Amino acid sequence: MAKINLDSMSLEELQQLRKDVEKALKTFEERRQKEARQKLEEEARKMGFSLSDLVGGKPAKKGRTLPPKYRHPDDASLTWTGRGRKPRWLVEEEEKGKSQDDFLIA
């Protein structure tokens, strides 16, 4: 690795160096993953496969699926987990004077 003489650098050069290092640190893991994927794709191609043939077409879904917390009284297929934007059916029921708690799943 090249040795950098920090004492001879101006303030602007040092600030730019800091920005460059921070960017490199942020993208380090992404670059390593990209490199690993390229190597694996190349090896799979040499053997007559694509990488997606070997590991599946889609990456695993991150996170978890939450169970519904609220249900429409007349249509059981309309549910809501309580996260994100309120569904239209719940907003309409609240406008009619009902409470969100009226739709809780027991």
Image (cartoon, rainbow, N blue to C red):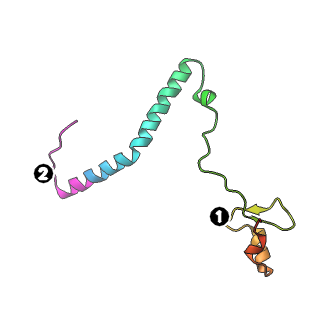
Please tell me how crowded label 1 is: few (under 14), some (14-19), or many (20+) other residues with Cα within 10 Å. Answer: few
Q: Residue 98 falls in which quadrant of the image?
A: bottom right
Q: CA distance from mark 2 to mark 1?
A: 53 Å
**In the rendered view of the protein, which quadrant contains the N terminus?**
top left
| Residue at the image point whose x is 46% and y is 37% from the top | 33
- Where does the image place residue 8, in percent across and percent down from the top left? 12, 50
Asked if the residue at tag 1 contacts the one at tag 2, i.e. Cβ–Cβ closer than 8 Å, the answer is: no
Q: Position of residue 14 (x, y in %)?
A: 21, 54
Judging depth in this view, the residue of 78 and 38 nearest the camera is 78
Q: Residue at x 60, y 39 (%)?
A: 59
Q: Nearer the viewer, mark 2 or mark 1?
A: 1
Boundaries of the magenta span: 1-16
Vertical order, 97 against 28 (above or below): below
Quick one: 66 or 1, which is closer to the camera?
66
Type of amino acid under label 2: Asp
Say whether residue 5 is magenta: yes
Give percent across and percent down for residue 36. Answer: 46, 32
Residue at position x 76%, y 71% in the image: 90
- The residue at the far bottom in this view is 97
Which residue position holds label 2?
7
The quadrant holding residue 95 is bottom right
Instruction: Return the residue at label 1.
Output: 83
Vertical side of 21 occupied by 45: above or below: above
| Residue 27 location (% of width, % of height) | 40, 45
Circle 2 sits in a helix, a strand or a loop, which is it?
helix
Q: Is residue 2 magenta?
A: yes
Q: Residues within 10 Å of mark 2 (few under 14, many from 20)?
A: few
Q: Quadrant of the C terminus?
A: bottom right
Secondary structure beneath label 1:
loop
Amino acid of disc 1: Arg
Which residue reaches farthest top?
Answer: 47
